[in-house]
Amino acid sequence: MIRPPVITIDGVETTFTPGETVLEVTKRLGVAEVPHLCWDERLDPAGSCRLCIVEVEGRRTPGASCTLRAEDGMVIRTASDKLRRMQGHLVQMVLSENPAEVSPRNADVGPTELQQLATDFGVSRDRFLGRESNRSKDDGNPLLLRDYDHCISCYRCVRICDEVEADHAITMTGRGFAKEIATPFDRGLLDSTCTLCGQCVYTCPTGALADKKMVGAAERGAPAAEQKVTRSICPYCGTGCSIDLHSKVDADGTETVIGVTPALDGPVNEGALCIKGQFGFDFVNSGDRLRKPMIRKDGELTEVEWDEALDYTAQRLRSIRDDHGPKAFYSIASGRAPGEGGYMLQKFQRAVMGSNFIDNCSRA
Ligand code: SF4
Ligand code: SF4
Ligand code: FES
């Protein structure tokens, strides 16, 4: 029998699948918390921030665990004092380039990944103070704030746009402090291939990119710590992407949806959303939304209970079929309906109404 390859991490021996990185094995094992900044599980590792360094027995220098492939017999240490010191220095250097100790996004959306690392390592930005980034771009697009003063050049936005969205709307130009995220010909996002999906916002670890609808939430009475977060399903199409709805709850219990974040653990979308799911939630708060079924009575649309509405609908459908024949009835399934809903409708159309006239608005 062939023996599976084995790696030892902080004294715990485990098998691994060839091709797995040390960081992936560490996360799967759950034995150690290896910090990381340029890593996102949806992306190919870039190995640029070096924060995920680990010690490998027999090697002189630590290696970045996000790019280091696990090897049979490898012995890894993730948490020595030396590593911790080096990682703390790295966080301080990254922080020093930013113009403020605290990201302006924290109040609205909670601590950014970089902020959380600074807290975990107990470090601040003033140790290596020097030149700062200064490259914000207000390109006038209505949905994405591009506050590159807080950019640390981790490339996560560029990589998610390329590798996950395949939109290739942004890239990195320049070197050193002149490095910046740019669009083709340095035009605004609206003049690029950007689909305003928001993926770059929700991978950015520093708040350099932000959802404009969430910006200022704290000032509007909904700081991150007080927002109610409800796991839901995007209502726009039948794909069923998982979303987290952020809402402000007033003292009288009134709830107002103020933003959406993609659910990384959503089984269908794994954190991906389109522009509609990400930004198109305002209709939920509209006073014109129908909240109860309505029947026209004496020429006026009148709110009724569901039982009355369903009885009325059944009676009308029956009379159409009986008076005009099955072919008088044609169904269009909503593109928002899940597969099960579409299946039910075609069963109803064929078995109950006796007609094959059915279509789906997704074909439009
Ligand atoms: S919003 Fe989407 S398409 Fe536009 S730059 Fe960001 S990741 Fe790319
Ligand atoms: S904008 Fe954010 S995600 Fe993009 S490179 Fe800068 S810090 Fe990284
Ligand atoms: S997370 Fe590994 S180098 Fe950045």
Image (cartoon, grey):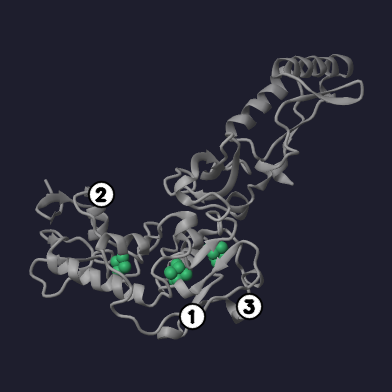
Say left or right for 243 vs 364: left
- Pointers 2 and 3 in contact (C-beta within 8 Å): no
Who is closer to the viewer here, 46 or 211?
A: 211
Q: Quadrant of the N terminus?
A: top left
Amino acid on which the number 3 mark rests in the picture:
Arg
The amino acid type of the residue labelled 2 equals: Arg
- Asked if residue 360 shows in the view, the reply is yes
Disc ID at residue 134? 1
Q: Measuring from the top left, give residue 31's x and y in whole percent.
A: 19, 50
- Of the two numbered discs 2 and 1 on the same chain, state the one appearing first in sequence: 2
Asked which secondary structure carries label 3, the reply is loop
The residues bearing labels 2 and 3 have C-alpha atoms spaced at a distance of: 42 Å
Label 1 environment density (alpha carbons within 10 Å; few <14, some 14–19, many ≥20): some
Q: Is mark 3 within 8 Å of ligand 1?
A: no
Q: Position of residue 364 (x, y in %)?
A: 74, 47
Q: Earlier in the sequence, mark 1 or mark 3?
A: 1
Cα distance in 3D space between marks 1 and 3: 18 Å
Q: CA distance from mark 2 to mark 1?
A: 39 Å
Q: Which residue is mark 2?
A: 28
Q: Residue at x 58, y 53 (%)?
A: 220
- Residue 155 pos. (x, y %): 42, 71
Of labels 2 and 3, earlier in sequence is 2
State the residue position of label 3. 187
Task: Give the quarter of the image for residue 175.
Answer: bottom left
Instruction: Please give the name of the residue rendered at 17% of the width and 67% of the height, measured from the top-left corner.
Output: 83
Q: Is residue 256 above or below residue 210?
A: above
- Between 165 and 308, the one lying in front of the other is 308
Q: Quadrant of residue 198?
A: bottom right
